Image (cartoon, helix red, strand yellow):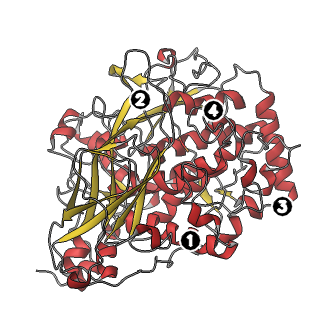
Amino acid sequence: MASLSQLITNPPCTIKRTSPATPSCPFLPAQARAPLSLCTHKRTPAISCSAKNQNSQNDNDSLNRRDVLIGLGGLYGAAAAVNTKQAAQAKPITTPEITKCGEANLPQGAVPTSCCPPASKKAPKLFNPPGLDTPLRVRPAAHLVDKAYIDKYSEAIRRMKALPADDPRSFRQQAMIHCAYCDAGYKQADFPNIELQVHSSWLFFPFHRCYLYFFERILGKLIDDPSFAMPFWNWDSPAGMTMPAMYTNPRSPLFNVFRNPAHMPPKLVDLDFGDKDEHNASHDNFSDSEMVQHNLRIMYRQMRTNSSTPELFFGKPYRAGGPVEPGAGSIEGIPHNSVHDWVGDPEQPNKEDMGSLYSAGRDPLFYAHHSNVDRMWNIWKTLGRRNVDICDTDYLDASFLLYDENAELVQITVADCLDSERYMRYKYQDVPIEWKDMKPKVKTRQTRSLRPKSTLKEAQFPLVLDSPVRATVRRPKTNRTELEKLLKEEILQINGIKLGRDVRMKFDVYVNVDNHETVAPAVREFIGSFTNVPHKHRHDQMDMGIETSIQFGLTEVIDDLGINGDETIEVTLVPRNGVGKVTITSITTNLSG
Ligand code: C2O
């Protein structure tokens, strides 16, 4: 058997470019990566990870596809999906013809409006990536730009807002894209009764990347500057933790009146925001420096501890005809949802604009928020050996329809957007990442005999979460060795989370705490939260509730608490918002690559 050090320095198998990728080999070694010139990005009807996939039309086609994928420089589960039922059925989510966009389901109190884009006279063209000789656009941190940049960006947004409302490039239409894709404007192309939803699954990162890509291209075109790069709200860094100043000038086209007035600068963002009464009592007393520390630890927890496998980071697989909203990835929940909630105006019926998904795109700040979310995808890929893109044909072939800078309809796939530099020709300004080593501190280092005992009542499943409860959960294995930990992550999964989609929800999850009220907000024992930003209301006869799930990485937590020898852990669930409006079927653990 290979030694630990061999496994760390050498991927566990070799993939040769001339043979099909080997099932069970999740890691593509550096030597198997194609040089840049091989990234021909040939767009094929169905990109496959295997030369002998059932989607192959002929061997040449297969080779092209493999070249494209190997050229991506690292894909998770290469061919692991091949031979599985799902792959055999090949069910990527695809957007139907744009004329099939229908009435979206808006929350109560929303002004009725259509979310659908204008029809296109021409059939959509396939995404044509900018060539590798196109200069890279560098998206700057919003708090670091100069006046010239702000003027230019403001002018671009002003022009976008001035376009006729039925121009697909207008600000109004750009905002509607989000509504159509997240409030059931579209049904799935092959399943006209099932909605197409881009949240709470592995589609979250790629959809928003594609959406922002064209938004940015349109802005560049409007100011006649194809090198224009949009800003990102650097909320993960102390210097960027207030709402960026350029968005808060009431005379600027970047301003939006529907925001929480209590959260204007110099108020620091709370990346773990989401209590029912508009504040986290324990966070309200924070000094600025405590809030910064808190946010950095939340970032570490979400980007590292809870993102230690691709599925944890990206979210659960979502296939055509299958369950909608199977489970969000770590970042989609916190801080993505919590920042939406923090910005939205509590005086509006649905915390418009940012606090509801149907209206979020109306706030120019939305695009800077998502630019930073998108940046997390690039950063995550640099953080660990397991941190590679998902290679599953149902993921790579999923596609969206968006209008480009010339008002032409484009079909873009997930495979088209995996690498922002190579295929979309943009990257992010290099700024300090202060959270990288900010691991949350343990409150109580434990041993089995000294484990703190909670006095809460033991949960009975199915559980209506109307008050804090504890649940004793069996671990998949005790005393895991370093090698085992390296190969498989121990995961805690909360299953069958049922709630109305219009419910604003947050519940927190702790491991082995005697009293959650006495632990500091970002201690190691606080392993994460489930959140929901309202996105759709119950629609006439159809039950529009969601059944979803959430997962947390346990390996590092178990180590830090010193409980690797324990057979069980004690999980505490604490409802913070939407109290009593969620039920949970079970809590389980598993080991996953
Ligand atoms: Cu599509 Cu920030 O959500």
Towards the viewer: 66 or 203: 203
State yes or no: discs 2 and 3 in contact (Cβ < 8 Å). Answer: no
The C terminus: image quadrant? bottom left
Q: Real-space Cα distance between discs 2 and 1?
A: 36 Å
Question: Residue 243 in the image: x percent, y percent?
Answer: 72, 56
Q: On the image, numbered disc 2 is attached to which residue?
A: 196
Q: Quadrant of residue 526?
A: bottom left
Q: Is residue 133 left or right of residue 462?
A: right
What's the amino acid at mark 2? Leu
581 up-or-down from 520: above or below: above
Name the element at disc 1.
helix
Q: Residue at x 49, y 56 (%)?
A: 334
Q: Residue at x 82, y 54 (%)?
A: 149
Q: Is mark 4 within 8 Å of ligand 1?
A: no
Numbered tag placed on residue 146 in the rendering: 3
What's the amino acid at mark 4? Pro
Ligand 1, image quadrant it occupies: top right
Towards the viewer: 134 or 512: 512
